[in-house]
Image (cartoon, rainbow, N blue to C red):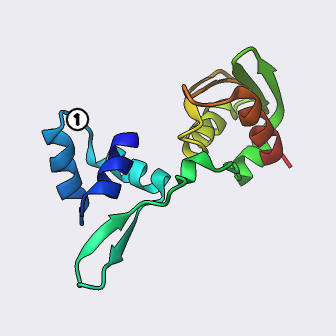
Amino acid sequence: MRTIAHLLRTRVISGQEELLQVLMLQGVETTQATLSRDLRDLGAEKRTLPDGSVRYIVPEQPVQAKVQRIQSDLLRSAMTGVSLCGTFAVVKTRAGYAGAAAKEIENQAPQMVLGTIAGEDTILVIPSENGDAQVLCEQLRAAMK
């Protein structure tokens, strides 16, 4: 995402297709879906400039750097507990809810969570490389309320 933010701050890029082409020229392979998610996470917005041209604008502090709140009715009703285990979070759920809750955690916090492994009533949450397991646990506990 740093590459995308740098490109958007230093070049006039008006659309995702153009950005994909510039990334490919720099040897960065990505998909349209990943690019869309990265643009959203960066808080990139299209703006019309005074000369009438359109370009992406990226805020100085990316959205992902801000503390994210995980909010979900599914998580609120499914989760029964959250524990910190070393660098991982362990989430306990009602029986049969772990799979759906794991997917919801991944959807709600894509920049905080690298992945999840779900059983019947337990989820192992693996924080992203830049993620902080303690902050992730706090966010998950807050989602239970």
Question: How far across and how far down the image is residue 44, in percent?
Answer: 42, 61
Q: Is residue 1 visible?
A: no
Question: How far across and how far down the image is residue 7, in percent?
Answer: 29, 50
Q: Residues within 10 Å of mark 1 (few under 14, many from 20)?
A: few
Image quadrant for the N terminus?
A: top left
Residue drawn 43% across the image and 60% down it: 58
Left or right: 34 with respect to 17?
right
| Res 28 → quadrant | top left
135 vs 115, nearest the viewer: 135
Q: Residue furthest front?
A: 10
Q: Which residue is mark 1?
A: 29
62 vs 125, nearest the viewer: 62
Residue drawn 18% across the image and 33% down it: 27
**44 w.r.t. 68: above or below:** below
Residue drawn 13% across the image and 40% down it: 25
Q: Is residue 97 visible?
A: yes
**31 w.r.t. 48: above or below:** above
Residue type beneath disc 1: Glu
Question: How far across and how far down the image is residue 57, in percent?
Answer: 38, 65
As helix, strand or loop, the secondary structure at mark 1 comes to loop
Left or right: 108 with respect to 44?
right
**62 w.r.t. 3: above or below:** below
Question: How far across and how far down the image is residue 20, in percent?
Answer: 21, 49
Residue drawn 71% across the image and 53% down it: 71
| Res 49 → quadrant | bottom left
Numbered disc total: 1
Left or right: 120 with respect to 39?
right
